[in-house]
Image (cartoon, coloured by chain):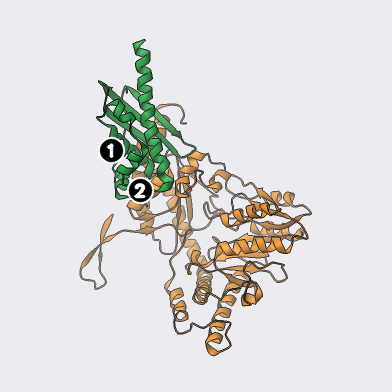
Chain colours: A orange, B green
Amino acid sequence: MKYFALDNTGKGVLEMERRVYMDHAATTYIKQEVMEEMMPYFTEKFGNPSSVHSFGREARKAVDMARDRTAKALNASGDEIYFTGGGSESDNWAIKGIAQANKHKGNHIITSSIEHHAVLYTCQYLEKMGFEVTYLPVDQYGLVNPDDVKRAITDKTILISIMFANNEIGTIQPVKEIGQIAKEHGVYFHTDAVQAAGHLPIDVKDMNIDLLSLSAHKFYGPKGVGALYIRKGVRVHPLMHGGAQERNRRAGTENLPGIVGLGKAIELAYENLEDSSRKLTAMRDRLISGIMERIDNVRLNGHPTKRLPGNANLSFEYIEGESLLLSLDMKGIAASSGSACTSGSLDPSHVLLAIGLTHEIAHGSLRLTLGDDNTDQDIDYVLEVLPDIVQRLRNMSPLFVQHKGEKYYV
Amino acid sequence: MYSEKVMDHFMNPRNVGEIENPDGVGQVGNAKCGDIMKIYLKIEDNRIVDIKFKTFGCGAAIATSSMATELVKGKTIEEALALTNKAVADALDGLPPVKMHCSILAEEAIKAAIEDYRSKQLVSSK
């Protein structure tokens, strides 16, 4: 799809490919203000925060400021924030760190069946090391039932790890209730808030969260940097051994520009939270209802209202997700799918199966995740091109014919 | 990740559709795995005079179906049976390793359609 636009001199016209990015749950661009704060820390303010001299002190000051900004966003204190290499590291650290440090108390961990692989595979690894893990089911919307959490607790339970909001279907969990249950039973509560941080209000005190993972590139910060909030007094073993960085708990020279970027990005995100959230929710709902009005045999995955502001996840019957993504990509639209063909395995998304979708419906899923750069015109454009794409693929599908001509399909 | 030829056959697939009163029909794969290919054949004097397909699947599944039908159209049954999945993949300038199973499915779908044709011949000659 080509369109014409004024070039930056305002004179000529440029032929441009129209590109619409709707994969913000995968990653976001870095906002200009964030980039500007990071820049000096690549060049003139390059010091090692552990150094005694002025270069080091200047760097240390920047890390401390980022730590305070992160703490403020979560209603934590600065000395409860530990910078990491990203969301996966934070999840690994929280779970393995709690397991190792508390194995004298018990060997049981409770999590859900729809967690990110950074949590699920870490739990599976711990099972091989002798830990026992309960994977709680979810309902048709992807919600964990707090009563199930309560019932799963035994005298051996040391950790509950339930995500704040799901990366695929956007469902927001009853975090506060789960935190309350964990507190009442004296069990640590970790939440993977990689999709929630910067997008939903978070108060670790009010929600009784003991550990929380976040990642900068999901809220317009840089890739390769994240944080783990660890409530004061929580016993956690380190994942990285070495130098005395991060109060002896996470070795390795700090990713200085990354940390500065994370701090600025999370501050910006929470300054603009209400505006951004209202705008995204309105666009999301128009996108979802627009698709459902224009196309038959579509279902919305995830909860209709308890969902991330920018997340739309739909399944289109009779077609497969990867061919949908390729077709959208040809029109300049970037999206994602829970189809097996996009994951390199034979099974479709574990999240879509956990909410009760059949394999064939799960294969036909499409995730569109909106961000601050999206406009109403972007929504119009998707609504304009998607029906034809779906129809073209359905016309090619043997399942669609069987549906039209006979009583049921395979 | 896909070659230009794969994208061409995905965006402009050849021989899509169905044949009324086909001489042979073959269906392989299943919706659970995310791939179903259905091939329709019209055969005259031991030669494939027309072939159509319908596919539920990823870009590679649609492109291999399209290419496989192109490769056997106009060929004798024996020539069509000699089609290998590698020949289909090569004709598309290769497939990513995780997508090679799609080419196998295409080969199997054509063989299944010919098998169906042959079993019908057997019944009608009895």
- Horizontal and vertical percent position of residue B117: 35, 22
Q: Would residue A11 be seen by someone viewing this image from the given angle?
A: yes
* Residue under the point 58% across and 55% down: A172
- Residue A114 in the figure: left or right of residue B22: right
- Horizontal and vertical percent position of residue A85: 55, 68
Q: Is circle 1 on the same chain as circle 2? A: no
Q: On the rendered image, what quadrant is the C terminus of chain B found in?
A: top left
Q: Where on the picture, by quarter, is residue A173? A: bottom right
Label 2: few (<14), some (14–19) or many (≥20) C-alpha neighbours in 10 Å: many
- Horizontal and vertical percent position of residue A391: 35, 40
Provide the chain ID for the residue under circle 1. Answer: B
- Horizontal and vertical percent position of residue B46: 27, 22
* Residue under the point 48% across and 40% down: A361
Going by the numbered disc 1, the residue's amino acid type is Arg
Q: Estimate the spatial distance between the alpha carbons at disc 1 and disc 2, rounded to whole Å.
A: 17 Å
Q: Would residue B57 be seen by someone viewing this image from the given angle?
A: no
- Residue A136 in the figure: left or right of residue A225: right
Q: Nearer the viewer, residue A381 or A340?
A: A340
Label 1: few (<14), some (14–19) or many (≥20) C-alpha neighbours in 10 Å: many
Direction top: furthest residue = B126
From the image, tell me which residue sits under label 1: B14
Going by the numbered disc 2, the residue's amino acid type is Ser
Q: What secondary structure is marked by label 1? A: loop
**Mark sitting on residue A327:** 2
Q: Nearer the viewer, residue A159 or B108?
A: B108
Q: How many marks?
A: 2
Provide the chain ID for the residue under circle 2. Answer: A
Q: Where on the picture, by quarter, is residue A22? A: bottom left
Q: What secondary structure is marked by label 2? A: helix
- Closer to the eye: label 1 or 2: 1
